[in-house]
Amino acid sequence: MNMMTKICVSALALSIATEAAATEWNVSVWGKRRAFTEHIHKLADLVAEKTNGEFTMNISYEGLSKNTENLDGISIGAFEMAQICAGYHPDKNRAITVLELPFLGVNTLAEEVAVSNAVYAHPAVAEEMAQWNARLLMTSPMPQYNLVGTGEPRDTLDSFKGMRVRATGGIGKAFEAVGAVPTSVTSNEAYQAMESGVVDTVAFAQHAHLSFGTVNEADWWTENLNPGTVNCPVVVSIDAYEALTDEERAALDGSIDEAIQYYIDFYGQTLEKWDGVLAEKNVKKVQFTDEQLGNFEAVGGKPIQDAWVEEMSAQGIPAQELLDLVRSTLKAQRGN
């Protein structure tokens, strides 16, 4: 073998080794790119930058899995990272459904991040998610849900009786407590359900009303009902996470806070646009009195929280401890 041949062989071997060392993750999300997924895109950018392109993420919108099956996909290693919502499969992620209980009193996205991080770090939560080979990486903080609806405004609790509402988790149970009829169609199906009259109302955060088009069917919007929100973490495969090099893992973990802050800033821009969209589409704002809100919380708040604690405790989940953790974290966050 002459010198030139040796050089070519060495170069080829180096190229193959370099290519083999690169890490590429597939990420399963749904819908389309929107405020709800901006932290994932930011995280991917930061990780690629910090690793000089040696650790990249391919973000797929429904190309890998249905939104209700993302946790299953993680468990079988179909992809390395995914966004999930607790309410889509509450039996598989029972512990984090504490964050979907109604009337927890979370007021800001920063508070939502704080309580989510505290719950995600609890050993019982990590243990339950590990059954699905899932590690909770970061939350997708959302503001309180509110309704858009068709027809005459539902502006009293009595008017909720018989109201067909798209609402999941604890929010759905809160509406059920005041006589509404909740249905848990996925976010992708919400517009069609509203357009066809399957539901009268849809409970979403603002970005989702925009993204999934439900605001386009709306005659009115509950500006201050605020019964709660859903919790939609980003999870990664434990196997994939542990297979990262120390440098790659540091790049991933070290980018989370910046990605979350980017999300919060981006979401703020969405909220600034919201009033303009309502005015443009002639959507009436519905305001509830403090008395009405207090009555709603009395019926749809503590009783549902108490029932959740009893049910989860019977299943071996440290439910009261988790609920107390949410409350103590909120108190500490506000103290700061």
Image (cartoon, rainbow, N blue to C red):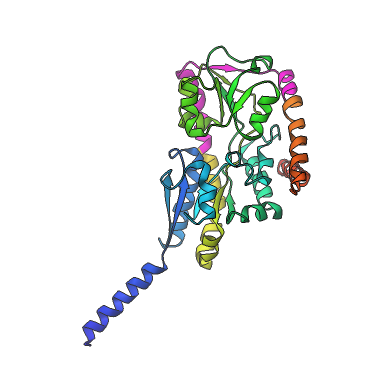
Q: Is residue 81 visible?
A: yes
Task: Tell me the quadrant of the picture where the C terminus can be found.
Answer: top right
Which residue is painted at 51% across and 16% down in the image?
Answer: 219
The answer to whether residue 283 is magenta is: yes
In this view, 253 is above or below 320:
below
Residue 207 pos. (x, y %):
51, 32
- Relative depth, front residue between 51 and 139: 139
Majority secondary structure of magenta residues? helix
Judge from the rendering whether residue 115 lies leftward or rightward of residue 306; answer left or right: left
Q: Is the residue 133 above or below the residue 232 in the image?
A: below
Q: Quadrant of the N terminus?
A: bottom left
In the displayed structure image, the side of residue 51 where residue 285 appears, left or right: right
Image coords of residue 106 (percent x, y): 68, 36
Residue extending farthest top:
152
Q: Residue at x 48, y 15 (%)?
A: 282
* Residue 277 visible: no
Quarter occupied by residue 307: top right
Image label count: 0
Residue, x 67% and y 15% (percent of image)?
Answer: 156
Residue 189 percent location from the top left of the image? 48, 31
The magenta segment is 267-296
Q: Is residue 118 above or below residue 151?
A: below
Residue 60 in the magenta stretch? The answer is: no
Q: Position of residue 3 (x, y in %)?
A: 23, 86
* Foreground pick, 327 / 234: 234
